[in-house]
Amino acid sequence: MKKLESSLTNMVLVLTGVAVIMGGVLAYVNHLTEGPINDQKAKALADGIKSVMCVNDIKVAKTDTVRQNDAKGKELTYIIYQTQDAQGKDLGAAVESTTGGFGGDLKVLVGFDPEGKVLGYTLLEHAETPGLGAKADKWFQKGEKGDIIGKDPKEPLTVSKDGGQVDAITASTITSRAFLLAVNNAYTAYKATPVDGESGATNQVKEEKED
């Protein structure tokens, strides 16, 4: 067999062939793992909803998407999971809300009762400094220093440094403000769900998924 001449054309052909093969392999692996990854995310979300609503026997009766403009005019998107118990009684909703923290996006899932009081929360994603901003996962839970459980964000929750009633995480005021903003925004989105069309600066797009 004649050895290929070492030329730019041959090198390009070889590299192109390798790239095509590797692309195919990666696509195949992605296809194999996509299902399990999605299943894992769905389970994590389901567990998160149970956790923030403080109920195990629960179902998502409807999912809404709400888009609102923040104070700077930036459009933010919230996912509202309207929940019911086994008897069909309204339990309130779990709301996904994202704000910018100290290290990057801070995404929280907040549970509200039908009146709007905070039932619980969990961090879904964050890029905060380990040991400082990352403490938001526990700091604002019931019985902790920054406890917000049972509070009604009708009057926005703010840190004591800004004149509010919530103790900020030690040395992490920026993260604390971002977290409370995410909770306040989640509350506003939750209260906007019964409204169709436009209401002030709120644009609501309802994507209902009935069981």
Image (cartoon, rainbow, N blue to C red):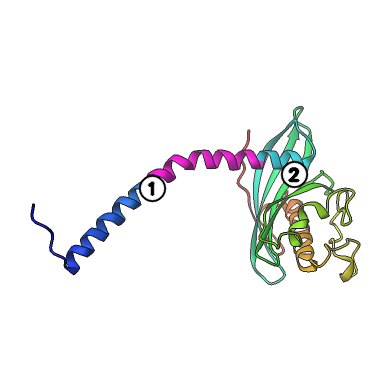
Q: Which residue is mark 2?
A: 93
Give the position of the C terminus as an image quadrant: top right
Tell me how far mark 2 sits from mark 1, CA to CA.
37 Å
Q: Are marks 2 and 1 in contact (CB under 8 Å)?
A: no
Vertically, is 116 above or below 180? above
Callout 2 crowding tier (Cα within 10 Å): few <14, some 14–19, many ≥20: many
Which one is earlier in the sequence, the residue at label 2 or at label 1? 1
- State the residue at coordinates (11%, 58%): 3
31 displayed left or right of 109: left
Is residue 208 highlighted in magenta?
no
Callout 1 crowding tier (Cα within 10 Å): few <14, some 14–19, many ≥20: few
Front: mark 2 or 1? 1
Q: Which residue is mark 1?
A: 27
- State the residue at coordinates (43%, 45%): 30
- Looking at the image, which is closer to me, 128 or 186? 128
- Looking at the image, which is closer to me, 36 or 116? 36
- State the residue at coordinates (73%, 53%): 192
Instruction: Identify the disc placed on residue 125.
Output: none
Which residues are the magenta region? 28-45
Vertically, is 51 above or below 163? above
Secondary structure beneath dot 1 equals: helix
The amino acid marked with disc number 1 is Ala
**Could you say where residue 96 lies in the image, as x and y percent from the top left?**
69, 51
**Could you say where residue 161 lies in the image, as x and y percent from the top left?**
88, 70
Helix, strand or loop: magenta stretch: helix
Is residue 36 highlighted in magenta?
yes
104 displayed left or right of 150: left
- Looking at the image, which is closer to me, 94 or 51? 51
Residue placed farthest to the top in the image?
87
**Could you say where residue 64 lies in the image, as x and y percent from the top left?**
65, 47
**Could you say where residue 169 lies in the image, as x and y percent from the top left?**
83, 62
The amino acid marked with disc number 2 is Ala
